[in-house]
Amino acid sequence: MTSEQSDDDIFIDSTISKAHRFFPPSSPKPITTKRNHEASHDTISPLIRQIKSASLSIGENGENERTVHNRRRPSVLDEKALREADTETVREQRIDAISRSYQDILQSIGEDPSRQGLLKTAKRAAEALVFFTKGYEQSIRDVVSDAIFDEECENMVVVKEIDMYSLCEHHMVPFFGKVSVGYLPNKRVLGLSKIARIVEVFSRRLQVQERLTRQIAEAIAEAIEPRGVAVIIECLHMCMIMRGAQKVNSRTTTSAMLGEFREDPKTREEFLTLGRIKPF
């Protein structure tokens, strides 16, 4: 079995500098708070406050003290896609590197990569893996920036049973299923196709279903600051069906409720009724 390679090992032959292939995590922005004694209301969106509440702690001694955690959760909209700046040349270099790795894998499992049926398998598999992870090529801000519209709409918007396909980051085998998304507008709406695009961008990465559910909800919440966002995902996981427990009929359901969907049982129940996912 070949030893595990780092990213530097994989691209050791590349003439492209690391700066064009990898993106350092953005530095956490300090949180500052201003208290205007003349103001009679808080201008921070309650929903955004709910999302960021994990980053702030208020002292219990009655004083107006706030402590910024060492690691603040970054904005979903500001996250850089890992392959956002890839050129066609870099893409081809990735495919070549992954192809060589697949050649080693074929040999390691006892196969002969030179036999007729496997002659092009390594490159096909490499191209497929790059496609399966194409969510690394686009940021959420790029997806939603031109599709936010001012609209006097207060009724619930639900887009249900969006098809999704992803790769489990633990075993790199597929999991797939349906996504239902709902939100309560707050004078702004998001183009319906962009909701499906958000699902596509996040799902076409190495994922776990729990994180995927939260990311979709938080992206919509940050993009249009609605009164609430709800997401339900139901999936079949090949890592439970093809291996491990081998439970063929098992399905995994996850949900994320923000704003009024979390606080108001009637609103939550309405979404659960409208967004119900049919058996597939």
Image (spheres, rainbow, N blue to C red):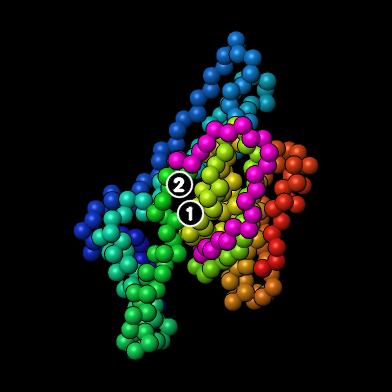
What is the quadrant of the N terminus in the image?
A: bottom left
Q: Which residues are magenta?
A: 145-170
Farthest residue toward the top?
A: 38
Q: Which mark is residue 143?
A: 2
What is the quadrant of the C terminus in the image?
A: bottom right
Q: Position of residue 3 (x, y in %)?
A: 37, 71
Q: Position of residue 197 (x, y in %)?
A: 50, 52
Amino acid type of the residue that numbered disc 1 sits on in the rendered structure = Val
Farthest residue toward the bottom?
A: 115
Mark 2: secondary structure: helix
- Judge whether 87 appears above or below 92 on screen: above
> Which sits in the foreground, 173 or 203?
203
Amino acid type of the residue that numbered disc 2 sits on in the rendered structure = Val
Image quadrant assignment for residue 163:
bottom right
Q: Are marks 2 and 1 in contact (CB under 8 Å)?
A: yes
* Picture residue at 48% right of the left edge, 59% below the top: 204
Q: Which mark is residue 94?
A: none
Please say whether residue 257 is one of the residues in the magenta stretch.
no
Q: Is residue 2 visible?
A: no
* Picture residue at 41% right of the left edge, 86% below the top: 110
Q: Which mark is residue 201?
A: 1
* Picture residue at 54% right of the left edge, 63% below the top: 165
Mark 1: secondary structure: helix
Please say whether residue 160 is one of the residues in the magenta stretch.
yes
The residue mark sitting in front, 2 or 1, is: 2
Q: Position of residue 233 (x, y in %)?
A: 64, 57
* Picture residue at 51% right of the left edge, 64% below the top: 167
Q: Position of residue 271 (x, y in %)?
A: 72, 48
Q: Is residue 279 visible?
A: yes
> Which sits in the foreground, 15 or 41?
41
Query: Reading the chain from its start, which is encountered first: label 2 or label 1?
Result: 2
